[in-house]
Image: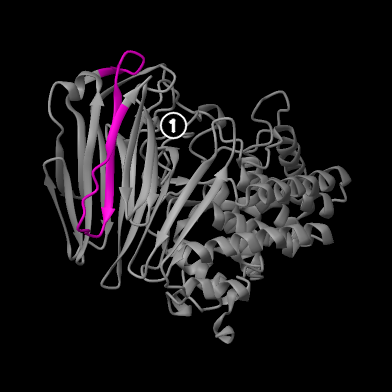
Amino acid sequence: MKASINQLEMLLRTIRSKESAYNEKIRMLSSPFNSPGYHTTIKAADVIHSTYHSLIYALGLLDTEVEAYEQRAFDIMEQVIAMQDTDRSRSTFGIWPWFYEESLDQMSPPDWNWADFCGKQLVLAELRHGGRFPARLRQALRQAVFHACDAIMLRNVGPSYTNIAIMGAFVTLIAGEVYERGDYASYGLERLEKLADYTRQRGAFQEYNSPTYTYVAIVELSKIASATVSSKAKALSGELLDRAWKSVGDYYHAATGQWSGPHSRAYQTLLRDQSKAFLQLATEGALLFYPWEELPYDAEWFGCGIHCPAEHIGAFFASETRTIRQCYESGEGGDKWATTYMTPSYTLGSFGKEIMWNQRRVLLGYFDNDGEPTYVHLRFLHDGYDYCSALFRSVQEDGHVLFGIGFLAEGGVTHPSLDRMNGRIEASDFRLRLEIGGCLDRVSAASQGTGAEIRIHGMHVQLRTWHAAFGPFIAERPWRWEVSRDSGKWNVDFVIHAGERTEIDFRRLGSAVMCFSLTVGEREKPFVPEMAEADGVMTVQGFWSDREMNLSLPTRPVGS
């Protein structure tokens, strides 16, 4: 199989595929507009020109060693370097805007991570190809890297921000080695040591079980391991890589080919083509999703030495029934736990306590639907977008999750910190949703009084409502479930409000708490919990397969 892996040929194929996307006038790479909904103020555009992706493309051009691509790479580097803020009196010193179409002043707010994202591409360009650059451009590149390093050190992100902690360590460590700057190299190594210590203490990365950021961590740690001359940095990055790959293997569900939940941060619910290609490349074809000549190759992988240690590859093919319980965060508010239950035919995971941000997958299941994956994903929607201040709490035993929904009185609306509300929002629609996606053949869903019944290729999924109160919105009418099919998904919705735009004041709402259960499989003895309320707390207790399940839920919005 190894003989079929020619990464240079894959890189060339990727670079050639982007030929039509290069804008010679702007000297940057164009791409379809995509946004997570924050940082950028651009709401719609046909195409944009990304600073970061243009730098990936420019480095890829140089990595091909094709002489005809050299000038284009230099043109892109020159253009993007010129977009960096070099004014030390400004808070945005050392960073770049996301797009050519939007300046740092227009962003809301700017993304300080761009010193790390863009800086790592520039320092790699110097490391691999510095001698090829024209003298003036090479000096500009050097100064841009120094500005990025200074911005990274000034911001001084801690080890809890895993991917940025790693990127910042990489930029400063390698810049220090390449340019013989001891201050940068020492800072980068110290930052890597802090991350290793922090991760050892937790037993997991801060971005717990994140398909997106575990992937990023592996790529960036692989860059450190392959690029640094420091034996200590190689050892630390190797230790962290081993932990990361063990996590990937442990949570990979062989029957569905998906990454079991819950996910602390994710941007898609099904694995992307890029993620599958990455796993195929890293396992040297043990996981085979594509013919090698068609593998979707990312230019950023080239030269990084990405590979999964042999001792972890067997975990990707495990099919026994097992449960993973992990304490992934400790703090003043108590420990945070995650539970994952995996069987040969499905996997179901949940967090014990988390906000329902659009990057969280607080309750997530994958089902083997005749060889294709079908997922169920719990969301809370405010006017169609995930509401960040809905608070999920649960307890899980095997394929049964008892869970509640509460609310923060003064949290974020779409993001935990970027758009915090002052105790109130306006809404024309407010609802809990169990989204069913992926393969919808052999899937059915129907509302049934206090819940919903779902069938996925013969497997039974049951939703039940045990209690619901939300100020006047639910008190004035009975519980209502709606089931619809739209845009390639089944939506099973518990509707709180749908109609005229109205204000919801969480500080004056009164009782606002809901309790549900989700069960995979049928059982002879039904689950019926007992509930009691005292001192603003609802306690829920029941038994599942002779195991006691206890859940405590605040009856009022937290902080009201």
The residue located at (42%, 76%) in the rendering is 290
The residue located at (69%, 36%) in the rendering is 94
Q: Residue furthest top?
A: 508
In this view, 117 is above or below 424: below
In this view, 357 is above or below 122: above
In this view, 479 is above or below 528: above
The location of residue 362, given as percent across then percent down, is: 40, 45
Q: Name the side, left or right, on which 34 lies relative to 175.
A: left
Amino acid type at circle 1 is Thr
Residue 230 appears in the picture as rendered = no
Closest to the observer: 395 or 217? 395
Please say whether residue 373 is one of the residues in the magenta stretch. Answer: no
Tell me where the magenta segment starts and ends, as one range: 503-532
Q: Name the side, left or right, on which 280 lies relative to 175.
A: left
* Quadrant location of the C terminus in the rendered image: top left
Q: Which residue is mark 1?
A: 41
Q: Quadrant of residue 242?
A: bottom right
Q: Name the side, left or right, on which 550 lies relative to 519.
A: right
